[in-house]
Amino acid sequence: MRLHLPFPRHTQTPFIELDTSACQACWKCVESCPQGVIGSIRFLAHRHAHIDHAEKCTGCKKCVNVCPHAAIRYTHVPLKQS
Ligand code: SF4
Ligand code: SF4
C-alpha cells in the first residue's frame, strides 16, 4: 500500500490543483491523463485521486475537462509577454 502524505505536491502540478474533498473517486481523470500524472488512493472509505507524478504534467487540461465534480482546477498563470 502506498503511504499517503498530505503534501501539496500530491494535490498540485505546475498546471493544475486537485481538491480531494470534492473528488468522488470516479477515476475519469486517472483514465484521461495521457502522462500518467494522476493515480488513486483506494483504501476502504478513503478514496480519491492523487497526484503521483506532478513533474510529468504538460497542462493539457484533459483532467480538468473530464472531472464531473469540478475537483480539478487549472491554476497555471502564463508569464506576461513583454
Ligand atoms: S493537465 Fe493533462 S497532463 Fe496534467 S494531470 Fe491533467 S490530464 Fe494529466
Ligand atoms: S475525475 Fe474528478 S471526481 Fe473523478 S476521480 Fe478525478 S478528481 Fe475525482
Image (cartoon, rainbow, N blue to C red):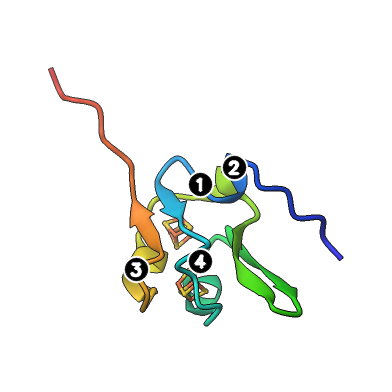
The reply to whether the residue tagged 4 has its Cβ within 8 angstroms of ligand 1 is yes
Q: Are marks 1 and 2 in contact (CB under 8 Å)?
A: yes
Q: Provide residue 67's location: percent of width, then percent of height.
A: 39, 73
Q: Which residue is mark 4?
A: 34
Q: Is residue 67 left or right of residue 8?
A: left
Q: Amino acid at mark 3?
A: Ala
Give the mark nearer the N terminus: 3 vs 4.
4
Tell me the quarter of the image containing the N terminus: bottom right
> Residues under labels 2 and 3: Cα distance?
19 Å
Residue 9: numbered disc? 2
Q: Is residue 11 above or below residue 72?
A: above
Q: Provide residue 36's location: percent of width, then percent of height.
A: 60, 63
Tell me the quarter of the image containing the C terminus: top left
Q: Which residue is mark 1?
A: 12
Q: Which residue is mark 3?
A: 70
Q: Quadrant of ligand 1?
A: bottom left
**What is the secondary structure assignment of the residue under circle 4?**
loop
Q: Quadrant of residue 4?
A: bottom right
Q: Are marks 4 and 1 in contact (CB under 8 Å)?
A: no
> Residues under labels 4 and 1: Cα distance?
17 Å
Q: Provide residue 32's location: percent of width, then percent of height.
A: 47, 74
Q: Quadrant of residue 72?
A: bottom left
**What is the secondary structure assignment of the residue under circle 3?**
loop
